[in-house]
Amino acid sequence: MHAYETSRIALPLKPAQPASYGSAPLQPISFFPAGSEIYAQGEKAGAFYQVEFGAVRVYRLLADGRRQISAFHLAGETFGFEAGTTHHFFAEAINATGVRVFRLAAGTDMSHQLLPLALKGLTRAQEHLLVLGRQNAIERVAAFLIDMAERQGGLRQIELPMSRMDIGDYLGLTIETVSRVFTKLKEKGVIRLLNLRCVEIVKQDVLSNMGE
Amino acid sequence: MHAYETSRIALPLKPAQPASYGSAPLQPISFFPAGSEIYAQGEKAGAFYQVEFGAVRVYRLLADGRRQISAFHLAGETFGFEAGTTHHFFAEAINATGVRVFRLAAGTDMSHQLLPLALKGLTRAQEHLLVLGRQNAIERVAAFLIDMAERQGGLRQIELPMSRMDIGDYLGLTIETVSRVFTKLKEKGVIRLLNLRCVEIVKQDVLSNMGE
DNA sequence: CGCGACTTTGAATCAACTCAATGTGAGTGG
DNA sequence: CCACTCACATTGAGTTGATTCAAAGTCGCG
């Protein structure tokens, strides 16, 4: 993990939020530039992470380079506990990202804090299995947009911090197919593309009914 | 949940294994006939389960009936904690199945025991995302067979307690495609079908290299 | 302004699907 | 014990939705 740990320099004040993870001492924030690695498959896991700003992708690779992104993590969300002792996945900053690192001190029991996070992640993953296993391209993109909207407070306008490639690798589609579906939804008046990374959901109901 | 709780009748002796989940009192075994429901989506969750014998499928449905099986659970495996307070999934016995039920007594903290199980389930689900998102039919079936073999002690001969339909709904394929892939693997001499529910893995290495 | 990376669009291909027919095997009752 | 049945599985033929390959378009940034 290579990042600029600046908490003691730029952020000497202890923010309120991380206090929710209790006993651990002051948690430093690490900065990751766009595309940089937060942790790698095979690395030993000794921490979990909370996104302060920016966005993170967690993924696995096949030997021939095929990639499956298993989750995106936006500001406020927590990740990195998917492993017992060793990471089975890669985590990368999508954009310039700040991450609060919670190191798991040996002997400290965090299962209380971690269990709800793990269960939430499990439910998320299992719901995504349904999308990948049984939904077509339009349904997948619709499910993705609805999910992103909900996680951004249910606003009509949503930010997509990731590229079409990332979206494709999350939804099990090619970038071309993702692009074609965006175009089709745009033509139907379901969404509007304000720019490449910003979508307005015009017909929430139509989008929701695609996911079933 | 409708099952025959017979532990006090047929199994008065306390087996050794469940003692690993500690403080709870004697855990009854429930019997579920083939196809019966163990819990349903929307039911409130207040227990987790360990398969004693038989096999279980956990799945979700779309409104139009499409089904995605997110996991199979064989003898010795634990499931049912995928929810905070409410189940998001259905669980059914595939065959005649015995399940040890661990009720979560209010006030009792099981996070210690549950966290490793949740993490294992999370890792499993995320690995399955890669299969569904990025692998073709042959690779999916190969991954499935390897997984089943490992979970049955790495033996050459493996039992498939589930139907082709179940396998298809787990792998995001149709029964026809599953059947065609089995035939192709058989023709290549990679596997042998002793009967519908029993497979012998002849070329372990070939099968393993398909999954990448 | 011009470069480079990303995205969109188009045309042809292909893997998996649908629909349909046939095959198989476990369980039942005559 | 055998014939019958029914559910499940396999095989075949034709279709289709997503992919691949290729070209054109767009955006951000130095």
Image (cartoon, coloured by chain):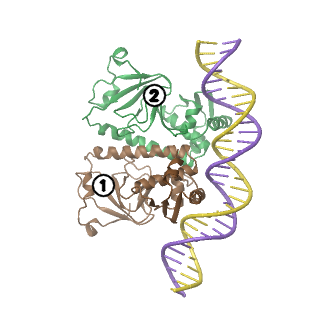
Chain colours: A green, B brown, C purple, D yellow
Question: Does residue D29 lie above or below A68 as drawn?
Answer: above
| Residue of label 2 | A37
User: Where in the figure is residue A21, as x and y percent of width and height?
Assistant: 31, 31
Q: Quadrant of the N terminus of chain A?
A: top left
Residue nearer the viewer, A139 or A108 = A108
User: Where in the figure is residue C20, as x and y percent of width and height?
Assistant: 69, 64
Query: Where, by quadrant of the figure, is residue A205 drawn?
Result: top right
Residue nearer the viewer, A154 or B78 = B78
Q: Is residue A37 left or right of residue B182?
A: left
Question: Does residue B65 lie above or below A123 as drawn?
Answer: below
Question: Does residue C3 lie above or below B22 as drawn?
Answer: above
The residue shown at (53%, 54%) is B169
Q: Nearer the viewer, mark 2 or mark 1?
A: 2
Q: Is residue B75 visible?
A: yes
Q: Residues within 10 Å of mark 2 (few under 14, many from 20)?
A: some
Residue nearer the viewer, B195 or A57 = B195
Chain of the residue under label 1 = B
| Residue of label 1 | B102
Alpha carbon distance from label 2 to label 1: 41 Å
Q: Amino acid at mark 2?
A: Glu
